[in-house]
Amino acid sequence: MKTPPGHREAPPARVVAAVEGERDRRFLIFGGVVLVAIALGFKSEIWAENQVWVLGLGLIVVAAPVLLGYLRSAGEPPAVEHYIPVALGAITLAGLASSPVFNLQLWQFAGLSVLFGVGFVVAGRLDYLRIHGSEKRGHVVLQEAILIAFLAGAYVVVVTLPFNPILKLLWILTITFLASYRSFRINGSSIAPSRAFIFAVFVAQVVTFLAWAVTALESYLVLNEGTFAVMLLFAWYINRGLVRHTVEDSFTRNVVFEYVAFAAVLIYLFVSNYQAGR
């Protein structure tokens, strides 16, 4: 008489780790094309100046779900610093399109819109590689160049448009804070959000103080808008860099020479345009 076989435990199921596949870059490129198409509509004569600024906000609204879908990792939405380049670009394009001060031809504005779309795609792709630990050394330089280009455009718009002086200073404070916060979080070694927030406020205060000084001395300073924007950009670059290298303890002789040179140019721009006899 055969006895029934004993109960055999089922072998443990093999756990297969789910590996997130590479995101399709065509989704990000398509989003950039849509943003360029919307930006080209800014130059339409059917929009009033205030409506163009609303459309600029629409650029951010359209870009947000694109970045959310492309950069989302492990069920977590991307952090706020990933949305900052498109916000600075939207401010730049809306200001360039809404004011007759710039008087850009359609082909010129179209070229700037395409550059905005390319910058959006490249910045999004580099952010994706950084999130997934695939960032390379040259990517930091490229991220820095994109951020500086968007910030410079925003500065030019803010200092050129006939805003109320207080409103202009608030705009400078805001865009400087946004650019500084992204730089501390993305470019180079990532700084914790709370510390990056505090450092960004510090840099924004210094740059805004310079803008206030230039505005207060406007009867003695002969500055065109381009020079004013360059001075703000230099002030941002110097103070942001000083904070970054202090946190990383990475000051070298070459770094000191670099920032001394930028500071010398900034002082020269200020002094050379100062006319005490006016």
Image: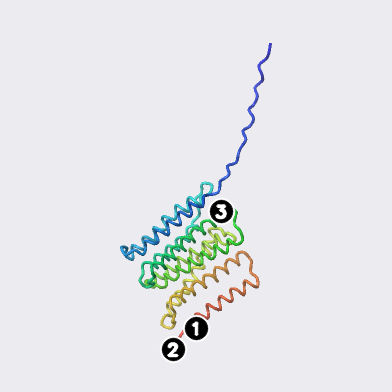
Q: Amino acid at mark 1?
A: Ser
Q: As shown in the figure, which amino acid type bears the numbered disc 2? A: Gly
Give the image quarter of residue 160: bottom left
Q: Is residue 150 above or below residue 264?
A: above
Q: Residue 36 falls in which quadrant of the image?
A: bottom left
- What kind of element bears circle 3? helix
Question: Marks 2 and 1: in contact by CB < 8 Å?
Answer: no
- As measured in the structure, the alpha-carbon distance from the residue carrying label 3 to the one carrying label 2 is 55 Å
* Residue at the spot of label 1: 272
Residue 163 position, x and y percent, is 37, 71
Q: Nearer the viewer, mark 3 or mark 2?
A: 3
- Disc 3 residue crowd, few under 14, some 14–19, many 20+, Cα 10 Å: some
Mark linked to residue 131: 3
Q: Secondary structure at mark 2?
A: loop
Mark closest to the chain's N terminus, 3 or 1: 3
Give x and y (percent) for residue 65.
44, 52
Whether residues under marks 3 and 2 lie with C-beta atoms below 8 angstroms apart, the answer is no
Q: Which residue is mark 2?
A: 277
Query: As drawn, is 136 to the left or to the right of 123?
Result: right
Q: Amino acid at mark 3?
A: Ile
**Picture residue at 50% right of the left edge, 55% below the top:** 79
The residue at 51%/70% (across/down) is 236
Earlier in the chain: of badge 1 and badge 2, it is 1
Give the position of the N terminus as an image quadrant.
Answer: top right
- Residue 61 lies left or right of residue 15; in this view the side is left
Tell me the crowding category of disc 1: few under 14, some 14 to 19, or many 20 or more residues within 10 angstroms, Cα based.
Answer: few
> Is the residue marked by circle 2 packed among few (<14), some (14-19), or many (20+) residues within 10 Å?
few
